[in-house]
Amino acid sequence: MTASNSSSFLFSLLVALLLFASMQVFRTQISASQPMTIAGGFVGSLIFVSLLTAISNFEMNTFGEHFQARVFPEVVISLFVSVICCAFVHRVCVTTCIIFSLIALYYINRISTTTYGTPVGGPTGYATQKKQK
């Protein structure tokens, strides 16, 4: 069962807000040890993924079903907001949030490419030019 763009937007925004609130509630526990600061960065990357989902679903609801999220501004804004959320907790959370978010972005892009195919522009290069001759 799939959710519509508007309901997925609201759900992912709610998840991001709940994760941010839980990070603020447990700020002292997250800052207490190194493994917890790494876990705080992981929670920050979950905020990144849910914000990216929320922004993408909002844009698909507003601009049409075939609208795609791009690196700038959607990914950059989501990463910036998640880094700010982690900065309220601990500095190490910021670093691990960036690392985990980039790993998550790689896998999101990989899943999207296998599910929906190659991007609209398609690959251009030597292989394409060789076939044309």
Image (spheres, rainbow, N blue to C red):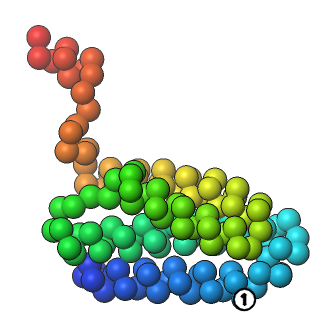
Q: Is residue 56 above or below residue 100?
A: below
Report x, y in % for residue 15.
50, 83
Report x, y in % for residue 75.
43, 57
- Residue drawn at x 20%, y 73% is 62
Residue 98 position by quadrant: bottom right
- Check disc 1 and report its element: helix, strand or loop: helix
- Residue drawn at x 27%, y 22% is 125
- Identify which amino acid the numbered label 1 is placed on: Val
Q: Is residue 48 above or below residue 76?
A: below
Label 1 sits on residue: 25
Q: Nearer the viewer, residue 96 or 88?
A: 88
Q: Nearer the viewer, residue 39 or 98?
A: 98
Report x, y in % for residue 120.
19, 45
Would residue 14 be visible to someone looking at this image?
A: yes
Would residue 39 be visible to someone looking at this image?
A: no
- Residue drawn at x 72%, y 88% is 25
- Residue drawn at x 31%, y 86% is 7
Report x, y in % for residue 81.
54, 67
Q: In what quadrant of the picture does the N terminus appear?
A: bottom left
* Left or right: where 87 falls relative to 10: right
Q: In what quadrant of the picture does the C terminus appear?
A: top left
Residue 74 position by quadrant: bottom left
